[in-house]
Image (cartoon, rainbow, N blue to C red):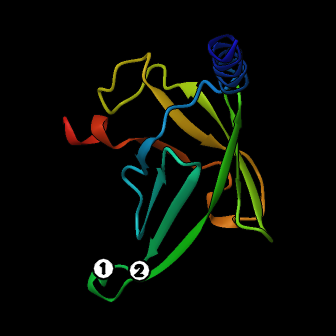
Amino acid sequence: MIKIICVLVSLIAMTACSNCLVENGVYASYGGSEYSTRLELLENNVFNLEYEVWKPGKKDESEIVTTRGEWSCNEKKVNLNTGNELHSFIMIAVGKNPLGIREDVKVVHFEEGDFEYLSREILYPLSELIEE
């Protein structure tokens, strides 16, 4: 009987988690002038977001804004929640692009939200940017 209960609990947990189509990992901006963005989605549903901005020619004097919170997912849509700010993004295939990244690679496409600097931003899997 205990084995049956364990199997049922496992199946319910797998079903509850299976509606998320987003993989944890590190995503980053590419080619931004005077700014960069890096998002880390951790397995424990915690995220780390780092936004760095600098004046032209002064990268060594950059300002870094770091945000941490929880992320949740439903299919391809992810919500980043810091407790008092909320931002959402969707995972989409990058399609044709000038970066030479395979068209089927999934990227982060931010919608409008509380993190103004992320609106309409696209972040690429860091592993794809490093391969270049």
Residue displayed at 73% across by 46% down = 111
| Image position of 14 (left or right of 58) | right
Secondary structure state at the residue bearing disc 2: loop
Residue displayed at 41% across by 27% down = 97
Residue 35 at x, y percent in the picture: 44, 68
- Residue 90's label in the rendered image is none
123 to 113, vertically: above or below: above
47 to 7, vertically: above or below: below
**Amino acid marked by disc 2:** Trp
39 to 35, vertically: above or below: above
- Extreme-left residue of the structure: 132
Q: Residues within 10 Å of mark 2 (few under 14, many from 20)?
A: some
Query: In terms of image quadrants, where is residue 18?
Result: top right
Compare residues 56 and 85 and report the one nearer the observer: 85
- Extreme-front residue of the structure: 1
Compare residues 44 and 38 and report the one nearer the observer: 44
Mark count? 2
Is mark 2 in CB contact (under 8 Å) with mark 1? yes
Answer with mark 2 or mark 1, whichever residue precedes in sequence. 2
Compare residues 113 and 83 and report the one nearer the observer: 83
Compare residues 107 and 80 and report the one nearer the observer: 80
Secondary structure state at the residue bearing disc 1: helix
- Residue 54's label in the rendered image is 2
Residue 27 at x, y percent in the picture: 43, 46
Real-space CA distance between mark 2 and mark 1, rounded to the nearest whole angstrom: 5 Å
Residue displayed at 51% across by 62% down = 48
Residue displayed at 66% across by 27% down = 17
Residue designated by label 1: 59
**Amino acid marked by disc 1:** Lys
- Extreme-bottom residue of the structure: 61
Residue 9 at x, y percent in the picture: 70, 22
Residue 60 at x, y percent in the picture: 26, 85
